[in-house]
Image: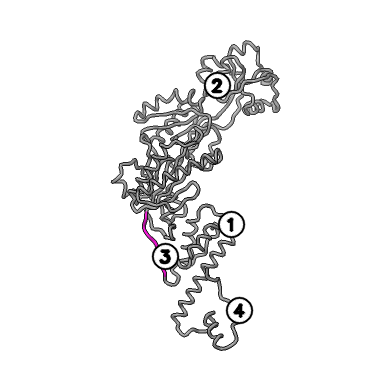
Amino acid sequence: MPTTGHSRRSSPTGSAATGKASARQGWRKPRDRRRSSARSADWDMRSRAGDCAAGCVAVSTNDDGGGSDAVSSILSSIAVGVALPQEIGQAAVCRLYRMELTWLLGYRGLAMERRLTVILAADLVGFSHLMEIDEERTHAALQTCYSLMQAVVSKHQGRIFAVAGDSFLAEFASPVEATRAGVEFQLQVAETTFDLPDELGLMFRLGINLGDVIVDGGNLFGDGVNIAVRLEGLAEPGGLCLSGNIYEQVGPRLPLQYEDIGPQVLKNIARPVRAYRVSLRSDAATSLLITATSSFSANWLVPRLRSFRSAHPELDVELRAMSRVVDFNREPFDVGIREGNGNWAGLKAFPLMAREFVPFCSPGFLEAVGAINEPKDLLRLPLIDWKDDWWRDWFAAAGIFDPKPVFSPNLYCDTQLAIARAAMSDQGVALLTPMLFENEIGSGRLVRLFELAGHRGRFWLVYPEAREHLPKIAAFRDWVLDQVRDEGAEPGA
């Protein structure tokens, strides 16, 4: 790298030596003013580049994965004389040295090499989660995917120019071939059986963009690359996201399901980029995949779904009851019903009814144990799922802050549905959410023991923010909120 300033060491003795050294160091007036200006510009460029790179080293020790963005930022900043941003990763600085920054900026008249090309960015969904569960098998599966990608990219006249952990970057000459490669890769991944736990699967997101890039040997840099990477984050798991200029080329040529999601504001990109999602699910537009807890599904949602299906006969509805919280980034669910506080990153959350819990038992159990007049009377009875924090909360609301039941051993269940079944079969007292068991309460199979109710959060309708505009999701949202209002429980109240 060039030096960052002029040397002030003493010149050798003698007029000739002094003249040469002085001219070299810029101390004497040169004979040719044009050469002087050029030399001065050279030194200014060398000084600025060196100072910027040195400043990067001085203030940064971490690479946040935005090396390409950082390089572009540095190039732009130095080229126009703007102060260099300080949030630059060490890896970006190393790249600057390797690319010989001053030459890329046109030092000594050499222009940087650029070209218009198609970039495909691929990223594995939920990589950190997969590695946390099983590092070795996840790594082996990722290597299999890389081999698939290599073969597909080569088949469509492209090349992979960068690999970073769970991400690949590839270059193509044709938007059509790049999109075909992306579709083929996604289908191959979906059809491949990986050696992973049954509940896990591999899904990639792909972004494709046509743009101008800087060429550095076999590597590529610039907004052309960055836009593809940002678009990848907008794709559905297992799908693609195309920039508008890619869609203009492939839309008339490839019969895919395109979804115009409008201009998108992308990180570190000056202007919004129009984007199009490509879903490879054959039923993506005509099916609605819902997740909810088993109790909510069986006792509240299923009995009411008939009216939604009647209003929207064009949609196939699939409801999956599960106790775990799903990851919308890794799994193909459209909407979900969750319990909690409504604060989930990347999700739109609409409050439904409050989660309250009250002690219930069966008529037969109540007859067998005798009168239950005060909350403390429960401590001598079998309390189903006693380890659940709901019991501590309810007793605290009743003024009992260190409850110690004397009956043991107890029965433990993992869902309200199972707990209610246990209570109705005379096995003890259960804490239940009344609105989920209206039929059982109305028919007398469950007896409410106290008016006092405990409260913890509420139920929420959730879905990814990026899918808010989809008609099927908007239709289900409006229907659920209407159902809650019709039953006298104003959403969010």
- Mark 1 or mark 2, which is nearer the start of the sequence? 1
Q: Which amino acid does label 4 sit on?
A: Arg
Secondary structure found at label 1:
loop
Q: What x and y, as percent, mark residue 398?
A: 66, 25
Check disc 1: other Cα within 10 Å, few if <14, some if 14-19, many if 20+.
Answer: some
Secondary structure found at label 4:
loop
Q: Residue 412 carries which label?
A: none
Q: Are the residues flagged by discs 4 and 2 in contact, CB closer than 8 Å?
A: no
Which segment did they paint magenta?
Answer: 110-117
Q: Which mark is residue 9?
A: 4
Q: What x and y, as percent, mark residue 289?
A: 43, 32
What residue is shown with label 2? Answer: 418
What residue is shown with label 3? Answer: 112
- Mark 1 or mark 4, which is nearer the start of the sequence? 4
What residue is shown with label 1? Answer: 61
Secondary structure found at label 3:
loop
Q: Distance between the residues labelled 4 and 3?
A: 35 Å
Q: Nearer the viewer, residue 20 or 290?
A: 20
Please tell me whether residue 265 is drawn above or below residue 281 in the rendered image.
below
Q: Is residue 6 left or right of residue 268?
A: right
Closer to the observer: label 2 or label 1? Answer: 1
Check disc 2: other Cα within 10 Å, few if <14, some if 14-19, many if 20+.
Answer: some
Q: Nearer the viewer, residue 193 or 421?
A: 193
Secondary structure found at label 2:
helix
Residue at the spot 41% in from the left edge and 67% down from the top edge: 111
Check disc 3: other Cα within 10 Å, few if <14, some if 14-19, many if 20+.
Answer: some
Magenta stretch encompasses residue 296: no
Q: What x and y, as percent, mark residue 312?
A: 36, 29
